Amino acid sequence: MELDSKLLVSLTETQKDFNAAKTVADEHGAAIIADGTAPKYLLFALTDDEGETLRKELVDRTAKRIFEKYHDAFKELAK
């Protein structure tokens, strides 16, 4: 796997100053937080549109899960 070194931020640095990782993500669209020499986390900077889309998808997935879990109860209530 090839990583762009501009995206790398150490886990130690991120724990001390999250703003360092946030700044990299803002400037490049993403930051890779590395624990030692291994990439461990990926931080994405989202545009307002992307954030709104993710929120809607989360609501949709949650609603689907609740509906599937309580489907029989919803059928009973619909009678």
Image (cartoon, rainbow, N blue to C red):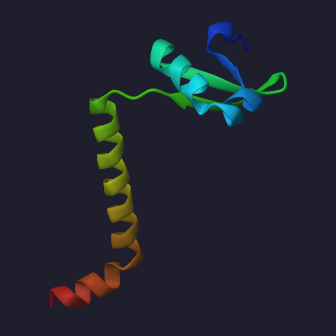
Q: Residue furthest left?
A: 79
Residue pictured at 24% horizontal, 84% vertical: 75
Q: Quadrant of residue 43?
A: top right
In this rendering, position of residue 12 left or right of residue 9: right
Q: Nearer the viewer, residue 40 or 71?
A: 40
Residue 13 place in picture, x, y as percent: 72, 27
Residue 78 in the image: above or below residue 31: below
Which quadrant is home to the C terminus?
bottom left
Residue 50 place in picture, x, y as percent: 33, 32
Residue 60 in the image: above or below residue 28: below
Q: Quadrant of residue 15?
A: top right
Residue pictured at 64% horizontal, 23% vertical: 32
Image label count: 0
Residue 10 in the image: above or below residue 69: above
In this rendering, position of residue 30 left or right of residue 13: left
In this rendering, position of residue 14 left or right of residue 73: right
Q: Quadrant of residue 64?
A: bottom left
Residue 17 place in picture, x, y as percent: 64, 31
Which quadrant is home to the N terminus?
top right
Residue pictured at 67% horizontal, 31% vertical: 14
Residue pictured at 70% horizontal, 34% vertical: 16
Q: Residue furthest front?
A: 16
